[in-house]
Image (tube, helix red, strand yellow):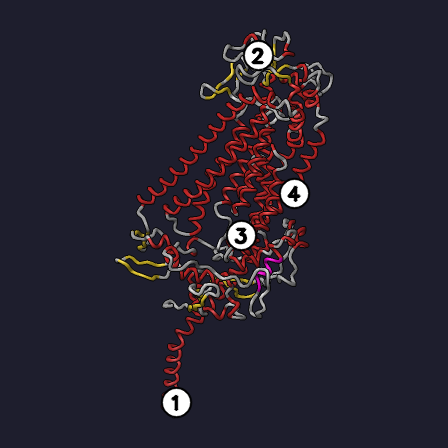
Amino acid sequence: MKMGMELEAVRSVVDEKLLFVKVHMPWDMLCTYAEVLHIKLPIQPNDLSTTSSPFNFLSCITKHFYPSEDLIAKETEYFTAPFEKDRLEYFYVKDRDLFFTPSMRSRMAYYILSRAPYEVQENIKKFGVTKLLDGGVYKAAYPLHDCRFNVMSKEDECPNERYLLYNEWAHPKSFYKMQPLDLIRKYYGEKIGIYFAWLGFYTAMLALAAIVGLGCFIYGYTTQETSTWSKEVCDPLIGGNIVMCPQCDKECTYWRLNSTCESSKKLCIFDNYGTLVFAVFMAIWVTVFLEFWKRYQAELEYDWDTVEFLEQEEQPRPEYEAKCNHTRINPVTRAKEKVPYTACGRCIRLSLGIGTVLFWIVLILASVVAIIVYRLAVFFSFSTRLQSDLKELEPFKEYVTAQMATSVTASIISFVVIMVLNILYERVAIWITDFELPRTKTDYENSLTLKMFLFQFVNYYSSCFYIAFAKGKVVGYPGQPVYLLGKYRNEECDPGGCLIELTTQLTVIMGGKAIWNNIQEVLLPSLGFGFVTLFVASFPLAPVLALVNNLFEIRVDAWKILTQFRRMVPEKAQDIGAWQPILQGVAILAVASNAMIIAFTSDMIPRLVYYWSFSVYPYGDHSSHTMQGYINNTLSVFDIQDFSNKSRPLQTPYWFNNSTTCRYRDFRYPPGHHRQYEYSIYYWHVIAAKMAFIIVVEHIVYLTKFVLSYVIPDVPYTVREQIKREKYLSQVILHETNLKLVTKRLKPVADKIHKHNEDKEEEMMDLNF
């Protein structure tokens, strides 16, 4: 009240002991703090005609799905300038009650409340409503909603914005409608607005990726029965006669290749030529997505007056100001200013934060190693007992293999560990960021976002990276296997590759995370992005799942904040903050990871090498290029007499008869060759083709990225013109104001000179007379 606010106490109609204190800001106070916070307000209507951009193709499609303008009218566009009380006459004030939006009023009120002093105790100044909330003086502090969400207010002055948002945005019947972003921003502020703008744009762009991914999946599903190499695996005369070497020591035994018939068919769904096309498409899609998002974000920045939202305009956090006990010289102004820590203290705080993050990342890697050990141990158990335990479930016996059971159980355990570590680390990250004492709210959120991303990137994706790039790569051969920790024999991939296991892992983690997030009411749209881009080559349905998840998430989040939450204090935000460089980094990494998945996890390159080189002369016997004989050509031969005592199987199946060799997945010379068990010429051809593929794909995609970045400007032409016009008008106002000020100051002097000259003229006339 001393600072000029008006307070109104109202007793609760439910609990007489509970009082509500309404906070009102008079016009003069609004003008004062609008200038303090550099709030941009209208100076005149926008007089530039808006021309549609050739790149804004989404608006052409989505314009038919916007809410009715009869209910949510399109806002008038204005040129704006930072508010100054002394230049009020130059601002476009039609109605004082509507000049400052509710979100502006709430932001100014919270700014005052968070800094208002209330007590001095032992030379310590206590201030801010946050401290009063912690002490129990107040139970809560929040802006009021303008009406009930499902009942329109009968008061003429009530805009009913909450009711309109619920009916045209959050209600299930409006699931197909575009979001009224201007009204969301007006009601909740720019930060909530930019969140839903990003989520909506991401969802719209996902539609194309989902269509292409679904097409690739359908192609794989329809061709799984006609795939040559899959038919060879399932053929009793080919796959039925190929005896595979045991995949673990002693307890595992020999097995026929056609026992993996069903898994090889399922693998064909995800590992086919369509997957290759889809991987390249997604690498280009992510580039296009980020380029168009930058343009769309530039439009929002201008429309929402955040183009010049610079650091000096953002006020320090109350928590920062409360601990400003040290003095330093500001490097810009050279004036003395208060800071909460010395240079050494800041270094200690940052070092502690970095050390904590690194410790938790090491903890994640330790959990990944533990899950790998689990996979190795349980595969041994499943290999010896699973088939006998499933004798009564004959229809499922051919589907449930030891490899599949190991993959599914390990994926579920991995998901549970991921979510538990995520919950624990989130609390630690908040505590560390609070300890670091960032100056502004933006600095705080960027610091917290970076910590959470580094942790969650390793947490969510480490198991996927293991399956994609480590599993089955260093296994040796049956006579000389490689062991983890000197005890556990390294995992081998299915004869068709590890791609189906990577698909299983992605399905469990991505699906489980989406369900968990909706149950926990967490707004984390940016973490869907890595699954859609980093490993999409192994799972073409990832964009479809992300699209469905986002469609639900937009409406669920809208319903939650409109019906279940108090109205949040509006906050200013220029962009998506630290997520922007993070997404760009993920996009660059996605190109490399997808190229490497196709090269090293998929069997695509070995198939192409066989088709074009080893199926015909001089390496093959076929007269024309074909995939026939691929399976036999890509499985190496091992003499069972060369087993070590540690690895030799204790039992042999009844059908083994007098076989002297078994086959294993690798490209090595057969026994009896002068270079037996060494890598064959096929292996070096495949390695060369894989490296060439990675280099070519990366260069094509990065060249495309460079061309698109050059062709598609970050800021649309119309926005650039409007920014120039706005700056020009601001300069005109500044010039006219300064001119008036100079005129006002010089007027007394001019009047005095004028009067003096008149007196002189009268004297001269008197003398002449």
Amino acid found under the numbered disc labelled 1: Met
Tell me residue 1's x, y (percent): 38, 68
Tell me residue 44's x, y (percent): 55, 66
Q: Does the stretch in magenta take in 38?
A: no
Q: In the drawing, does residue 478 fall left or right of residue 176?
A: left
Residue denoted by label 3: 194
- Image quadrant assignment for residue 186: bottom right
Which secondary structure lies at badge 4? helix
Which secondary structure lies at badge 3? helix
Q: Is residue 385 above or below residue 761?
A: above
Amino acid found under the numbered disc labelled 4: Leu
Give how far apart the Cα atoms at labels 4 and 2 are.
54 Å
Amino acid found under the numbered disc labelled 3: Ile
Q: In the drawing, does residue 514 fall left or right of residue 421?
A: right
Amino acid found under the numbered disc labelled 2: Gln
Residue denoted by label 4: 208
Magenta range: 160-167
Q: Is residue 275 above or below residue 653?
A: below
Neighbours of disc 3 within 10 Å: few (<14), some (14-19), many (20+): many
Tell me residue 22's x, y (percent): 45, 66
Query: Which numbered disc, 4 or 1, marks the residue that appears first in the sequence?
Result: 4
Q: Does the stretch in magenta take in 164?
A: yes
